[in-house]
Image (tube, grey):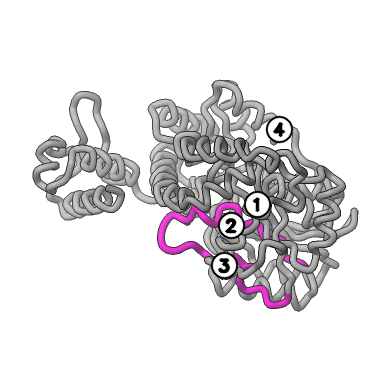
Amino acid sequence: MGVLYSQVADQLQALIQEGVYREGDRLPGVRVLSRQFGVSISTVLHAHQTLEARGYLEARERSGYFVRLPVQDVPEPRMPKHRSRPVPVTAREMTLDLCADEQKRMVPLATAIPHPDYLPLRQIQQSTLWAARRGLETLDYAFPGKESFRRQIAQRMATIGVPVTPDDILATNGAQEAIILALRAVTEPGDIVAVESPSFPGILQALEVVGLRVIEIPTHPSEGLSLEGLELALDQWPLKACVVVTNHSNPMGARMSDERKKQLVSMLAAANVPLIEDDIYGDLYHTGERPRPAKAFDRADNVIYCSSFSKTVSPGLRLGWMIPGRHMASARQHKYFVNLATSSIPQLAIAHFLEQGGYDRYLRSARQHYREATERMRSAVARSFPEGTAVSRPQGGFVLWVQLPEGVSGTGLYQKARAENINVAPGLMFSTTNKFDNCLRLNGGNPWTGTIEKAVARLGAMAHEQVTG
């Protein structure tokens, strides 16, 4: 049905664009369309939902579906042009506040956590029950990781251009631990590390834990890290590492092209500066083929690859992995000293899930859900926020970066929204030097509900108040 409903949606969209159905027209009933296209009623309903996400239909209670042409598109945010100096990293308390707020009954637009409706709950329950029955195999210290888990990861890495063996892989407690282990393997406290700007707060927290200084490199909302900015930083500062989310970065959703990834890998290898690659969103591309990681272009063993299943399968399993390459001995040592090993049952469960083929089947629907959800959120922001607002166009993942008009404070919106039980992530969280107060990150990966729609509209009204006030 997945391909069929998309075909029906495409045909209906073409009829709307050709003027057969005009703005405000009511579409024929689902039974009529079912006969017209020769498909089931459920397929027609799914096609309607797809067109809603694209902004072409509006459901009216007890009345049916009506044509609503998409609003004029909003521009992408501008790439920052600032030049930075290395500074110590201090994680903001609001990051922890946001995580705590997500546990309350607030509208969840802040943290980059996948919605439970989009996770393979039943399959993971079955695989976890299977793993729990493995007896003694679940009770040992699984260091450096369960062989079955590392074998499945090695097989998947081969499909994206990274041929490795199970012995090249270290299991971790999520990508966050993998990044910390990578930083500890290649730096000393006080060293300077380059990061994207804006940057994922978890990376900034990892840098703080290790006691490092950071230099922020401007990042384009579509093309990713500025290679020109990185080259200037390499010329000016003694960088010891560079941390980049190459595919569907958080918060902008940028994806570096293969050519730019090759240039990034070559540039850092020539400078003998390790690249720590976070590829946690790589599997959540919206269309086309799975983008290759920068590690696929690594010929000098200079890229440390990190990823996890927190954004795809389950954030609560806390299961990730890394490919440290020539830094394996150091990474293993730090891992062992910190927590000995990663829990056995999650590794066995995920290995079973992957081996049964459930992961790839699940991903096909998840990508569609996230593409439609982010398009719908982007359209809602365009309708509700004041003129001059810019919104990213992510090619994968489920977060949106919103750049507000001049004079509108993202921190101010965060505070007002929090008072009304709406949780958003203010731009200040994504930098060490207060650069993005006029920005917000929104979680666009929630199923669309009246509550979400009203929350976005209210955020837009608050932004309008700041403009007029």
Tag 2 secondary structure: helix
Choose the circle earlier in sequence order: 3 or 1. 3
Q: Which residue is drawn at 20% across and 24% down?
A: 62
Number of the front mark, 1 or 4: 4
Q: In which quarter of the image is the C terminus?
A: top right
Choose the circle earlier in sequence order: 1 or 4. 4
Q: Name the residue under label 4.
A: 96
> Residue 152, which numbered label?
2
> Residue 198, which numbered label?
1
Q: Residue at x 83, y 67 (%)?
A: 237
Report the Cα–Cα distance between label 4 and label 2: 34 Å
Q: In this view, does 17 lie above or below 290?
A: above
Choose the circle earlier in sequence order: 4 or 3. 4
Q: Which residue is drawn at 50% across and 32% down?
A: 459
Residues drawn in magenta: 274-300
Badge 1 amino acid: Pro
Q: Where is residue 138 in the image (x, y as percent from the top left)?
A: 68, 40
Q: Using residue 222 as the reference point, say whether residue 142 is left or right of it.
A: right
Badge 2 amino acid: Gln
> Residue 132, which numbered label?
none
Occupied quadrant, residue 92: top right
Number of the front mark, 2 or 3: 2
- Labelled pair 1, 4 in contact (Cβ < 8 Å): no
